[in-house]
Amino acid sequence: MNIEEVRMSLVNDLEKVNDLKELNDLKVEYLGKKGKITELNQMIKDVPNEEKKEFGQKVNEIRTMFNDIYEEKRQAFEAAILNEKLAKEAIDISLPSKKVKRGSKHPMTRITEEFEDLFVSMGYTVYEGPEIESDENCFQKLNLPKGHPARDAQDTFYLKDEYENFLLRSQTSTAQVRVMEENTEKGPIRVVCPGKVYRRDEDATHSHQFMQIEGLVIDENVSMADLKGTLELFCKKILGEKTKVRFRPSFFPFTEPSVEVDVTCFKCGGKGCPLCKQTGWIEVLGAGMVHPNVLEMSGYDSTKYQGFAFGTGMDRFAMFKYGIPDIRTIYGNDIRFIEQFDKKDGE
Ligand code: PHE
C-alpha cells in the first residue's frame, strides 16, 4: 500500500468503527508490529535520499491523523459507556423513603429524667447506689436495728449463704447512708438518688420491683420549712401548679419528725373519686428531718448539722402522668405498651 491508499483506508476504517473494541483492533491494524503505518515507516529507509524527507513527513502526518481520530473516537465511546451506566444506575430521589424506626423511651426513663432535671435545676447532684445492699446500709444505719418492727413493712429478697448479709434494697434511703459515708469531709450534701427497689408486694398499684427517688439535704441551719418548700415546689412542678400539698405527721425510724405528704387527687382534682377512695387526696411521699442517730452513724456531727430527706415512688407519678392503670404493665416489657409513650411528652 502506498501512502495515499493508507490515508484513504484509515479514514474509511475509522469512520465505520462501532465500539471501543473495534477501535482498538484498528490501532493494532495500523500501528501494531505489522501495522500499515508501521510498514510505511519501515519503507522510509528504502526511499531515495531526496524524497526521504517528504516521505517521512507524510508518514508522520498519517500517524498523527490516526492518533487524533483515534483519541476523539475513544473519548466519545467512553463517554457513551459512562452515560449508559449512569442512566442505568440512576436513583429516583422523589420516591418516598423507608421509615426509620426510632426506639422510644420507657415511661420510667422519662419520669426519672424529669425528676432529675428538676432537682439538678435546684442545685442537687444525682447519685445512684447499687440494688444489692448490705443489711447495715438498708436498715441498721437507718436506725432499724435487727428485729425492729418497722422492717416488716419492707420485707424484701435476701441473698443466701456467704452473702447472707445482703438483700435487694427495699428503699432508696440506703443511698443516704452511702452518700454520707462517701462524703469524707462531712460537709453539706444536696443529692437525689433514683433507682429500683424491691418489696414483697404485688397488686395493681404495687409491684415487687418499683422505682423510688430519694432526696437528701444536709447543712447547717436546715429546717422543716426548707423541706416543706422543696416538696411543695416539686409536687407542683411535676403534677401541675394547681396541685395542693398536705403534710401529715408520720413515723419513719430514720427521720424525726416524720411526715407523709398527700397531694390533691390527679384524677378528680380533690372532689373525690374511686382512685383517691373518695378522699380527694393521694399519698405520694415519705419525708422528715434526718434523725440525729442516722447522722452520727455515718460520721456527721448532729450538733452542727441537720438535714431533711424524702422518698417517693416514681411509678406512681408515671401512672398518674401517663394514665397507666396497672403498675405491672410498666414492668411487663411489652413493646406495644412502651411505644405508646412516643409522643406523650410533646415530642
Ligand atoms: N424510705 C421511705 C419509704 O420507702 C420513704 C422515706 C424516705 C421517708 C426518706 C422518710 C425519708 O417508705
Image: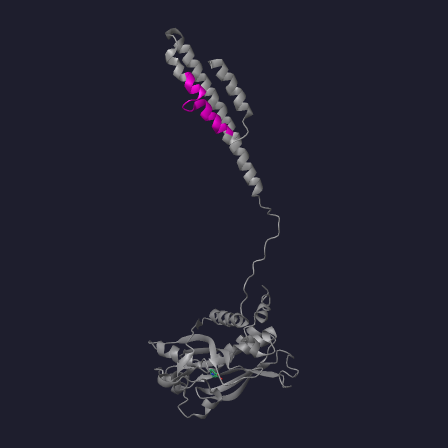
63 vs 186: above or below: above
Query: Can residue 211 be seen at all in this image of the molecule?
Result: yes
**Residue drawn at x 56%, y 72% as measured from the top left:** 334
Q: Residue at x 51, y 82 (%)?
A: 208
Q: Is residue 32 magenta?
A: yes
Q: Name the image quarter holding residue 235.
A: bottom right
Measuring from the top left, give residue 302's x and y in whole percent.
Answer: 37, 84
Residue 307 point in image, percent of width and height = 42, 81
Q: Quadrant of the C terminus?
A: bottom right
Asked whether, in this view, residue 223 is left or right of residue 333, the answer is: left
The number of numbered badges drawn on the structure is 0
Tell me if residue 152 is in the magenta stretch. no
In this view of the protein, can residue 240 be seen by the observer?
A: no
Could you tell me residue 167's position as x and y percent?
A: 42, 83
Q: Residue furthest left?
A: 184
Q: Is residue 271 above or below residue 29?
A: below
User: Which is more toward the observer, 243 or 2?
Assistant: 2
Q: Position of residue 170 (x, y in %)?
A: 46, 83
Magenta residues? 22-40
Q: Residue furthest top?
A: 50
Residues 201 and 195: in front is: 201
| Viewer-side residue, 160 vs 259 | 160
- Of 233 and 265, nearer the camera is 265
> Residue at (42%, 81%) from the top-left corner?
174
Residue 267 position (above or below residue 78): below
